[in-house]
Image (tube, rainbow, N blue to C red):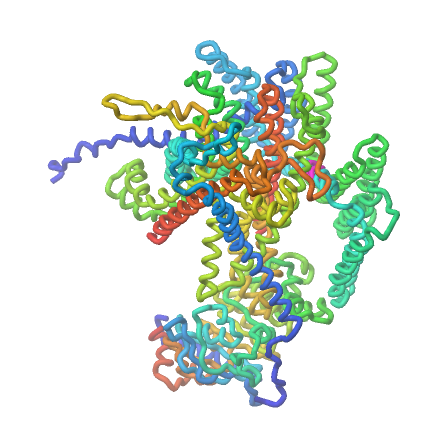
Amino acid sequence: MATENPNADGFGEVSRVRGIAFEYLSFGASVFGLVALGVLLVYVAIDAFDLANASPEWLLTYFLTLVVPFIVFCLYSANDRDVTRRALVALGGGLVAVAVLFSAIEALLVPIPRLNWQLAYLFVVAAPVTAYLAYVGSGGRVGAVGFGLLGRLVGGAALGLAVGTLFLVFDSLVWFLAYTLGVLPAVGLYAFGRVRESPRARTAATPVGLVGLTAAVFLRDVIATYPSDLIIYLWTIAVPVAAAGALLVADRRGRVAAAAVGGVPLAAATAGGFLAAGAGLPAPTVLLAIALTGVPTAVYVSRVVDGGEGLAGLGLPLLLAAGAIAGALIVEALGVPAPNPWLDASFLSEAPSRTPSEAGLYPAIVGSVIIIAMVAVLSFALGVGTSVFLEEYTPGTGPLGTLTRILQVNIANLAAVPSVVYGLLGLGLFANLLGLGIGTAVTAALTLSLLILPITIISAQEAIRSVPDDLRRGSDAMGATRWQTTKNVVLPEAMPGILTGTILALGRAIGETAPLIMIGAATTVFRAPDSLFSRFSAMPMQIYTWAGFPQADFRYGVVAAGVITLLIILVGMNGTAILLRNRAERGS
Amino acid sequence: MTDSTESPDLTRRGGLTRLKEGTYGGLFAACAAITLLTTAAIFVTLLSDAVVFFRSISIVEFLTGTNWSPNPAGGGQAFGIIPLLIGTLTVTITAAFISIPIGTLTAIYLSEYATPNARSILKPLLEILAGIPTVVYGYFALVYVTPALKATLFPEMSTFNALAASIMVGIMTIPMVSSISEDAMSAVPDELRQAGYGLGATKFEVSTGIVVPASISGIASSYILAVSRAIGETMIVVVAMGAQARMPEVQQALFGIPFVNPADVLLQSGMTITVAMVQITGGDLTGGTLPYNSMFALGLALFAVTLVMNVISDIIAQRYREEY
Amino acid sequence: MSNSTTDDSLITTEVQTDSNDGREAPAAGTAVAARDLDVFYGDEQAIDDVTMEIPEKRVTALIGPSGCGKSTFLRCINRMNDMIEICRVEGDVEFGGKNVYDPDVDPVALRRKIGMVFQKPNPFPKSIRDNVAYGLKIQDFDGDVDQRVEESLKGAALWDEVKDQLDSSGLELSGGQQQRLCIARAIAPDPEVILMDEPTSALDPVAASKIEDLIDDLAEEYTVIIVTHNMQQAARISDRTAVFLTGGELVEYDDTAKIFEDPEEQRVEDYITGKFG
């Protein structure tokens, strides 16, 4: 038998060449879009920051003062010999490889426009390696503390600026009365009820608050004298935020720490506000930014000091600030020619202009912030309401079940309606039929809310569906009504998921342009909107307008700066959403 | 029953408690009703103005006219949708040439070849492609892609052209193809793959010969969805394609067979349905004029086409979900 | 069960131990009664014409093979079956002399009088204190919540283990502790009846035996109705045992000792000696 075995010489071999080629082809396809996008982003960054005109000395200076210390910080935090070795090999080897490859391409093939090998190294090697090291470094305690602190500083400042922006539109005097007469007494009553175990006080809180709010609206025009805006913000926002921070700390670290955590930022914010008023800056915004940055930062620092781990990480913001200052001083002292970036402070704080060098995005940013704030409230409320109805209140069968299925199919279809059609809906319904006005912020907010509503609903439904049924049955068996189960068990569990989905959907809303054009949003406004019914522009709208200008300075400079601003805001929002989701996943 | 046990009160709560429960239920139902109202409002808004439009311009004229000029300087308005359809088809087909092969290959890679680690990195990164604001894509096409193509491949290309816009629409719709196709491929039961390997098939043969055919309905539904998205795409084409409603020149080839040189369409400016709508907003928006109403007629056409495509895609997708 | 005689004698001894605990003497009133109860899931009958009276302040065990309807019966008592859309109930379940399926009965109000413990421990993702206080909170309890939390945790034999960590999450406890937390949660609003649906089947033997001891104590104050697939457990802890067999039929219902020592029905004997089921 054995001698007759046809496989005696082995089984032969089946060719894998086709298969391997196909695997590489499919991998190439997977990254094609990403590489294309990456290249475009590199170019737009170069244009926005005028890096094409940056001298090698300038790049080297900042590389040494900013990037290198940051990398060292990350490596210190990672505390892993292997990572350090690999990072050094990548940075060093990459330098040689990019320089050789780049020169070869330039010499043999075609010159690459607006790039030199230093920039190529920066984007192809330094940036990815730094990002990777930041990721690895954040795994260590020191890095986690450093990034946590940095995140609170940046996030707090952004939040402060956003809240300050909102008060450009909302009446601060009504808010002052509403806070003093409604919010404060209601919160006080509720807290009293909690501490003294008095359900009656807790029940009374809501009506008292409502009465106060109503009174505020009526008294708005009756009262003649008001404190200055600065005092109002100090009283209604800075003080309560500081108090909340102090309360958070008081439980564990006692009175002195609590007073420091609340008091220091409050004092700094007050001082900052009055100084800014003296210097002619928008004092309330400065006050809000300092207060909303300072309090979370102080709470975080106190918590880290309490934990006693990774204290070195608290130095990260200082390290970066010192690096930036040192870089600036060296550049100044040596007279190194510096680039003249389009995206700078004046771009963010000035109005648009016909002259490229004077053009700014400020009114459009304000418009976007106001619209997004309204869209956030509307789409969150409607999205949660609808998804709770679909997931918790309707059965799967029977006539109501059919209704649920119809709603579901309808929502899926709405998600796929082109955004320009929503624009027509906004124009026909909100702007013209309901008379909310063409190109007003209200019309835009309503239109965009409907546009992202299906996305919000679908993600909220997923979040609610992921709450284990065990918990619902447990609550039902305790004799909880449907609303009690929803409020006490389902929503708290689903909230991180719902918030993540909503923020991602808001990211879609902030970049939408076509519906804004359809409802007649202004292509350019020179003043920030001061009411919900004033004409406004938004960031993508302004980008669209500028992209149509023929001058190269607009096309390659101003628009690039606008695009980068928009993308940074998007990355910030999506990053927050992802952090939220990760934290929720770790928690459960 | 012993007398010591009081009969417990199990009756329905009156008044406040029931009212509270009912109020919350009603509020949530009202939220859900808003989604239905939105659909109804879209229908009514589009239809009411479109009907006014079709009173002046007959449907036949609208559907067969070869000239689109809603606001001409010298008079002589014309509302023929054909040039817009040509523009929309050009963009859609060219974009599909990019998104379909790349998206399908991506899906195969993610579902069959990628390690779990690579998949967990690649999938969210691909979603970024769909998350970039479309006006930014339009800007990329106008300012970077067109000059690059002009400098290398097509020197005769005009500043505003269909090709660059289509490439960007294609890249934007890659994740739509890849994510739904990948879902369909991942749903193929592993036994089928095992059966293939058991017969001595290579991984390539299993992927292309077993997994892809088994998930074909899901893949098809992803194509339709991506195409529908490309049809409705507005900002990329508005920024990068220009706004010239043109009929391409028909040439005579050998034996008098008429044909259109693709370069005439792709490398030149053009106008899609969506661009036409945006262009009209430059005029009066308070309503009552013919161009204003024509926007809604175009919107209705767009809405109908995308709705039908979605429903078809949904029906096809249902089939693959039922298979396993 | 491979050796039926050994099992049989084992059960017998344990029943004798149980009957020494002094809960025998006074004739108890009826806490829950079922009359001509039929339950259908769609077209399938899950409970077939069951009539039984469950005494108060006793442990009553419902045993039987899987799919025999014992859990369904348990869930009829607090109307948790209402949550299943295809479920249809005919006949009466009386609780405190009132048919819980009367149209004017609010299932929510009913469940506030009846506690329930599930197969898998399901503490809410809240602090231990909030878990126990949950029932009080939803009923707007107007008294000293902390005191009630302490009493309930003591009642569930958990107080000593968690008194220093009341604010930490209930999910940080071990499986057995979680189940006792769920028992504490169930008894906090002071219900009259506690339903237990295989409360130890997801636990290790040590944790399970703690729960069994606890059930014995609970019967001092509450009527306990427990579904179990573990016959030794039923024999150890219950005063009365009901045997359900396939098709939702209540085959025999009597004092536990009687069921395990000398059942009337041959089918019941076959079942508890492991010949079938």
Q: Mainly helix, strand or loop, the magenta region?
A: helix
Write down the quadrant of residue A362 in the picture. top right
For residue B252, side relative to residue A77 (left or right):
left
Residue A163 to residue A125: above or below? below
Q: Residue furthest top?
A: A107
At horizontal 28% and vertical 39% (from top left) the residue drawn is B209
At horizontal 71% and vertical 26% (from top left) the residue drawn is A346
* Rendering coords of residue C177 (x, y %): 58, 63
* Rendering coords of residue A358 (x, y %): 69, 23
| Image quadrant where one finds the N terminus of chain A | top left
A421 or B200: nearer the eye? A421
At horizontal 56% and vertical 61% (from top left) the residue drawn is B29
Whether residue A221 is visible here, answered yes or no, is yes
Residue C151 lies in magenta, yes or no?
Answer: no
For residue A536, side relative to residue B308 (left or right):
right
Write down the quadrant of residue A522 in the picture. top right
Q: Residue furthest front?
A: B75
Residue C25 to residue A344: above or below? below
Whether residue A319 is visible here, answered yes or no, is no
Query: Which stretch did the figure color magenta?
Result: A154-159
A79 or A383: nearer the eye? A383
B113 or C168: nearer the eye? B113
Residue C230 to residue A27: above or below? below
* Rendering coords of residue B132 (x, y %): 53, 35
